[in-house]
Amino acid sequence: MTPDRGSMSARSLACHLGLAIGCLGLAIAALGLGRTAFAPAAILQALAGESPAATRLVVVEWRLPRVAAALCAGAALGMAGALFQTLLRNPLGSPDVIGCDAGAFFGAILALLAGGSVAVVAAGAFSGGLAAGLLVYVAAGSARTAPSRLILIGIAVGAGLSALNDWLIMVAPLDTALVAASWRQGALAGVDPARLVLGIALLAPLLLLGLAGSRSLRTLELGDDKALSLGEPAGRSRLRLGLLGLGLTATATLIAGPVGFVALIAPQAARRLLGSPGLPLTASALFGALFLLASDCVARLAFAPRVLPVGAVTACLGGICFVLLLLGIRRREATP
C-alpha cells in the first residue's frame, strides 16, 4: 500500500528533526573530544565566556572553528550533490566526481600564489569551478548529451586538474605549498579563520537560494517538456541551479578544501532516509554536515594522537559507497 501524504510528511519532519539534533549533539561532543576532554557543561560555559582561559582557548579558539568548518562545508557539499545529481539524472553526477571541486581548488591556489586576499581566493575558487564546469560542458559537445558521457568526461577533467593542482603545490614557495597541501587534504585543524568567516557569509544566502529553487528542481525531474508545460523554462532553470551548485562547491572548497565523496553520499543517504522519490535538498545538506563532522571525529580519534586529514576518512567511506552505487546502476540496467 502506498503511504499517504500525512505519513510521508511526518516521516520527513522526523528525519529532518533527527538530522538537525544529530548535528547539534555531535557538534557538542566534538568540542569535548580530544587529548583534553570536557564535559558538556564545561563546553557550554566556554561558549558563554564563563570558563577559565585555558578551557576557552581549547574549546572556542581551537575546536569550534574546526567543528563549524565541518558543518558548513558538509552542508554545502550535501546540497550541491543533490543539485548536480538531479540535474544530471545520475547518482554519480556529484561535483567531486565531475571535477568541479578540483577546478575550484585550482582557481583558489592560483589566487593564493598571486598573494590575493581572502575575497580574491573565494572569487578564484568560484571562477575555477565555473571554468571546470564549462570545460566539461564544451567537451561533452551537446546540451542533450547522455549523462553517463558527461560524467566520464568530468572524471577525466577532474583527474587532469588534480594533477595540475599537485604540480602547482610542488613548484610553490615552501610556506604556500605547506598551506595548500594541508588545505587540499581537508585538514580542518588548520582552517583559516578569515576563510571560514567569509565562507559562512557566502553559504547562508546560497543555502536559502537552494531552498527557494526546490520547486524548480522538482519540476525538472518530470522532464524538460513537462516542466515547460508547467511554466518552468528548463534551460534557464538548469543554468541557474547549476551555477548555484557550483557556488556551493566553491564555498565548501574555500572552507575545507576539495573534500571528496560527501556530495556523492549525502543526497542518496537522505533520499533513503526520507523514502523520497527525488533528492531532498534540506535533508541532503543536513546529512552532509553530519557525515563530514562524524568523519572528522573519526579522523581525530582513530589513530590518536596522530590526526588524519578528514579527506582520507571520507575517501575510505565514499569509495565503498561509490562501488555500491555502480553495482546498483548495473543491476537496474540489467533488469528487464
Image (cartoon, grey):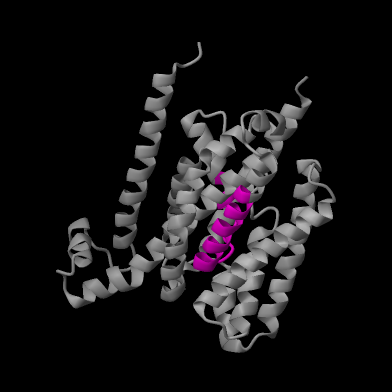
> From what the image shows, is residue 84 above or below residue 72?
above
Q: Nearer the viewer, residue 184 or 111?
A: 111
Residue 191's x, y, as percent?
Answer: 45, 72
For the question of whether residue 329 can be seen, the reply is: yes
Q: Residue at x 66, y 39 (%)?
A: 233
| Placement of 133 over or under 81, stated as above or below | below
**Residue found at the far right of this picture:** 141
Q: Nearer the viewer, residue 184 or 267?
A: 267
Residue farthest to the front, as pictured: 231
Locate residue 8, reporting x and y percent: 43, 24
Could you tell me residue 154's position as x and y percent? Answer: 75, 54
- Identify which residue is drawn at 69% across, 81% down: 170
**On the rendered structure, is 60 left or right of 189?**
left
Q: What are the residue bounds of the magenta stretch?
A: 240-265
Q: How many marks?
A: 0
- Most foreground residue, 60 or 34: 60
Asked whether the viewer can see residue 305, the reply is no
- Magenta stretch holds residue 104: no
Measured as percent of width and height from the top left, residue 52 is found at 16, 74
Q: Is residue 229 above or below residue 149?
A: above
Residue occupying the far left of the picture: 50
Quadrant (top left, top right, bottom left, bottom right) of the C terminus:
top right
At x 27%, y 64%, the residue is 37
Q: Say if 60 sits above or below 71 in the image.
A: below
Q: Residue at x 51, y 75 (%)?
A: 119
- Whether 249 is among the magenta residues is yes
Image quarter for residue 145?
top right
Left or right, residue 206 beside residue 39: right
- What is the magenta segment's predominant secondary structure? helix
Q: Is residue 62 left or right of residue 265?
A: left
Q: In the displayed structure, does residue 45 sit left or right of residue 294? A: left
